[in-house]
Amino acid sequence: MTGTPNAPLFILSFRQRDELASLAAGAGWQVVAARRAGGAERRFLSSGAAVAVIDARGAPADGVAAARTMSGAVEANGGALLALVSRGEAATIAALYGAGATHFLASPFSEAEFLQAVRFAARHAERMAREWAAGPVFAPLGWRYDLISRTLILTPGLAALLAIDDEPSVRAMLRRLDRGDRIAAVAALRRVSANRPATAFAHDSDLTTVGRVVQHLQLDAEGGRIDAVVEPLGSAPEPAAELRESLAGARDAGSARRWLTRRLADETGAPLHAMLIALNRFDMVNTAYGRATGDALLSSAQKRIDDVVRDMLGRDALIVRLSGSTFLVAARSIRLRIDLVVERIAHALARPFVTGDSIAVLGCRIGLAEALPDDSAASLLRRVSEALADARESDTATMRVADAEQGDAPIDQLAVELNHALERGEIGVLYQPQVSVSTGAIVGVEALARWEHGVLGTIGAETLFAAAARADLEIGLSDHIQRVVLAQAAAWPAALAGLRLSLNLTAADIARPGFADLFLDRVDASGFPRTRLTLEITESGLIEDLGIASALLSVMRGAGCRIAIDDFGTGYSSLAYLKALPLDYLKIDKKLAQDITGSARDRIVVRGVIDMARSLGLTVIAEGVETQPQLEALAAEGCQIYQGFLCAEPISVEALEALVAR
């Protein structure tokens, strides 16, 4: 037997627990055996085993469900999952594989065959442990081109050598080559086809430290992309294998563990935290609607997690989907900000998901752990796995923290601090430019609230207003922001005199008796012209009584203001709002706008929204535009104005003036 004598082994068998346990124990394994799936994940983690055996014979559905529950913990901890199945059950094998099983053994089998299968699984776990401990010995140079979205991604090593931070275009990369090499590159790209999926070409690199190189190209027809490895003249590696983890950070448990090992070795900066996020009820949705729908749900869930993590923790954070419906997030940050991230992820995943003509509600459980001074990647992952197991076993708790008492919710802490923050002037405003698609000129800005917290740094509007709601300060916060924005805008320099100003109103504002007169008096007292003011109403937080909203907004519009519906596409009563409210602008939610470079179906949905808005005489503004392909696709569909990082992040008045003056 490989590994340490008396190594632990976890066995879950619904019908033959004792027989399998006796067999393994007789061969020298230290067996922890269970007959029920409840608590199996926790027992596996507590056992310290690297191998889990799930006996699905005679209970295929229970076996698949158990594999889904346990696979995240098994993979995160570098283990192996051996599934025992009845011979001829091909569907069960496929389901178990999809649930995260790494090895299979079909019955009838002999005692020797069972023990050998366990040894093979243990050998796999040992090999994974060695690979994770060793880490990468080189940084591959390469790139991947997505044939559908027409986007090019460089490996970090190549991007660093070329001094490129952003995603470059194919044309820009070809311009780096001499004319003769450029012709060879184009010819190689054209040669790649389903009949000829691999080719190569050589050229002199503009990298002085590399010299002449060979680019090995390989078509992945199913994935719709071309993979390439750039190397000094020599043997041709297999591109997809080389690029799997180096293109966009960690993509699997092995590379995630290496990422954690590197961060643990670097003790500078804020504490390192890791969290495991498991979707609730995913198995039921997957069974009811099919695997294609399940895959789409996982993709949507990961996008929601990505949005929160990138917004709160930046692009240095690790985000990776493990087996089944479990996600790993890790980053260096102070605990309070991590708690806010957890709360926002839980809120994001609690929102309904659209699945064809139906709506699925999932939710999640989250385990969280902070790295200890003597932690390895393995011990950190095991502790966060145990925290997730605790959360799953709880009837009420969404989150569990390893080795720590549960404190007050972070939003509650911010709610306590908010009143003093208003008094100290910590709540300010930044402005995100709105750009004409046809001319490229900045035509307006959206005012966005920001809290410059003394400990957490910058806190965005979503978290800020969540804290205000908890503290019953929504109206006070909204009044404060309106006064700050109008006072600043009235004092704008001449270079900004032609810009429209978009200001968000909350549902609480609209429900206030006499709000129209109060607000218009505030605008007039500031000196900012009503005719340059757009009031944005968030669709997802809009009013229960559309009659009240329509009456109020009609007064505002009659007074010279313009009205926009914000975040369109995130709620479920959108058409009712369009019919009932006096609108001038429709703002497409950033998630919907960014999907336009996705599938043909995504583009059709965005096209339908734009066509509907324009047929109603509304000007269409796309939010969250980050790439040139997104902008070009939106322009082709008739979008008139955009805002997003492609032009600028939210900026100060001084930075806005400099940007407009370019």
Image (cartoon, rainbow, N blue to C red):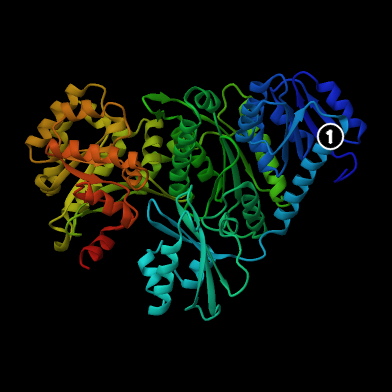
Give the class, few, some or many, for how many residues have Cα within 10 Å of label 1's Cα (few <14, many ≥20): some
Residue 311 spot, x, y in % from top left: 43, 48
User: 268 or 246, which is in the foreground?
Assistant: 246
- Left or right relative to 452: residue 59: right
User: 450 or 235, which is in the foreground?
Assistant: 235
Residue 242 spot, x, y in % from top left: 59, 59
Residue 460 seen by the camera: yes
Q: Which residue position holds label 1?
A: 113
Location of the C terminus (image quadrant) = bottom left
Residue at 12% x, 49% y is 527
Residue 20 spot, x, y in % from top left: 84, 26
- Left or right relative to 522: residue 505: right
User: 150 or 284, which is in the foreground?
Assistant: 150
Residue 584 seen by the camera: no
SS label for mark 1? helix
Disc 1 marks a residue whose amino acid type is Glu
Image quadrant in which you'd find residue 84: top right
From this view, report whether residue 479 is shown above or below residue 249: above
Residue 409 spot, x, y in % from top left: 51, 34
Residue at 76% x, 38% y is 51
- Residue furthest to the front in view is 195
